[in-house]
Amino acid sequence: MQKTPFFSGKAEVTPKNLGEAIQQAIEIEIATIPVYLFTYYSVNRVPDQDAISGALAQELTRKGMETPEANKVALRLSAEIMVYANKIGATIMSVVMEEMLHMSLSSNLKQALIGQPHLTGRSPSVYPACLPGHEPEFDINLAPFSLDQLMTFLKIESPDPLPETTPLLKAIPYKTIGQFYDMIEKCLEKYDKKLRYSTDRPQLVPGRRYYANNNIDTVYYDINHKAQYMDADDSGDLVHVVDLKSAKKAISQIVEQGEGNTGAPGLNPNGSVDCKPLNDKDYDDKDKKELSHFEKFALLYCEYNELNEKFAQYGLQDINISNYFVLNVPTNPTTAKYPKADKYPEGTIQAVSNLLNAVYTYVFIMTEGCYQADENTQYEIFMFGIHKTMIFILNSLCGDIQGLTYTENGQTFQATATFENYPFGLMSSPKSQLIELYNEAVALYPTISYLAQRFQDLPDVRLTDSPRGK
Amino acid sequence: MSKKSTKIENLGSSNGCGGGCSTPAPAPPSSGTVVPTPIELHVCMGLNACKGHDRYGTNECAGMGLCATAQKHNCHTLNNCRNQGGCGLYGDGEEQSNPGNNDCAWQGSCAVPIQAERYSTQGENTGKSVWVLARKLFEERMKKANRNFGPSPYKCGPPQAWLVESLGSYDSCGNSGNKYCSFGYNNPAEDAKELCEKSEPHLCGTANNK
């Protein structure tokens, strides 16, 4: 497990270590992003219903069901699989978007009280990783969708403390993310007269179209093709942090979106998932339209078991329903350890994976750049840089790399994004290095040739000085 | 459909937009003319303010054009210029309330043209048809300008299947699947009718959207 030492500070937040504490909060948020993204890209949101339905009908007939009935049951079960697979994607994407929002809210907090937030190179560098300072530690893997992976997500977002183990020594310890933010909030309240909020330093503020609660990727369709929206319009937005009131607003939004309102139940005492009906505290918005991250994942967990039970009712308990929509991707892959791709030259996966990691890292470089830029420059970096990179380059490459397969121990795997911190050099700009990486990758893997202009269109944002833990 | 989009590069001294239906179509390019006169750029079927100003240059009247004159694109912020962005699927509530009415290049909310099946995902129009909203805004603009206009070739906008047939290919963005029909379970015609009726009941009537 990767240890993430921050500083040898006290187990409390004070004005002296406030900057380090908020930086720790930022890195807690960042640590969740690659994990959720990895699992998101392990799911085929729109599997082939005809293939699923046909195979199920065949299996039901084999078990003695009359063909017309078998076709009817198979159609229904396959439609439920389609809904569930798409819902997994919508759920995880809705959470990832809010984790990026939380990273920005914490960064605003740091910018207001201390100065430049540091984001580049702060994703976990080794997996299994852990949340910085979380007690107890638990393994966080880059893993495809499964009930085990959902349990990891539930631990990350748990509103209740997890069972005790040995405490950490080198970061501010906490038992839930909400508890950690509570320590920061208490410090802000206690020392309010002493703390100074900058209103000059740039922040990512509301009203500039940087954040929207829903988009087409946070939507899934129910069995009657009615669009279901994972997030609510009133569930949150960016906050310009300028005083204690706005700081508390940013913090409460982070905590409530993750864990729900105060008193929201977590895992059962024995560590199992509570599948009882939802209550008001499980929501994070006043209209009760959006569940907390914890409850979104709990719902997926319970629905997976319900779907399994439905299959069992028809004697299909031996079928692993995940096989219908989870891709065969490795757990905790690294660029360096990927073997040679089938049907492509040596180094192809490495070239594409390096490019992808550089793109992923450049998103953080651009975000840091937003905290140093004037309003219009910030807008251009965000809308033409970050936004377009995420939708048109990163998302595309995450799909394209899965077109590369390799064989290991007789089994075929799809290569997938590793979300590693790319070590940009200082001799040239990150953008020019991105273009070089693209040229290397496209020479080996022409599938990505359509992205050439996208790289040329990126804004040129330089690396910032980013000392660890400051 | 195999009509060519030659008229989009129309040249001439007049853009032919003196009246919505009563004036002649724009003059064909005269020999020796070198200064191009742009025609109106709009984002979809039924949103043209002028006769002869659709992708094919053949429409008889304002509001009756077959297809967009703005450059086709498939997602958020890929529009070339002001008022050339589509709408729905991505962007905040304000962006998604203004199809074809964006302030600047790279500020449109979604793909052009706007297929009938597209809906808004944010703001007051959430869950309702983007094209119907675009048409409503167009009609309001025309009425305010004291202009006549005709009915759209499709009452609820161009179906995606028609766009694919007309343009050779067509797609709008997103990973959540087919906006028209998810499963073998659904009734696409009923879905399309319901979206249209929910969005603007007076515009729609039949399942086939004609």
Image (cartoon, coloured by chain):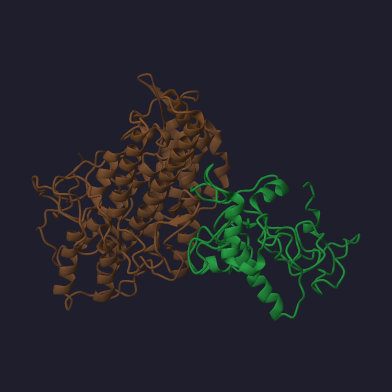
Chain colours: A brown, B green
Q: Quadrant of residue A179?
A: bottom left
Residue A357 screen position, x and y as percent: 40, 42
Residue A131 placement, left or right of B173? left
The image shows a total of numbered marks equal to: 0
Q: Quadrant of residue B52?
A: bottom right
Residue lying furthest front: A66
Say whether residue A440 is visible.
Answer: no
Relative to B73, residue A410 above or below: above
Q: Foreground residue, B54 or B159?
A: B159
Residue A204 screen position, x and y as percent: 38, 66
Residue at 25% x, 44% y is A152
Residue at 57% x, 39% y is A449
Residue A70 screen position, x and y as percent: 47, 32
Q: Quadrant of residue B118?
A: bottom right
Residue A174 screen position, x and y as percent: 14, 55
Q: Foreground residue, A77 or A303?
A: A77
Q: Foreground residue, A457 or B137?
A: B137
Say whether residue A113 is visible.
Answer: yes
Relative to B147, residue A45 above or below: above
Quadrant where the image shows the C terminus of chain B: bottom right
Residue at 46% x, 26% y is A61
Residue A222 placement, left or right of B148? left
Residue at 67% x, 47% y is B164
Relative to A421, residue B102 above or below: below
Q: Foreground residue, B115 or A432?
A: B115
Residue lying furthest top: A410
Relative to A159, residue A61 above or below: above
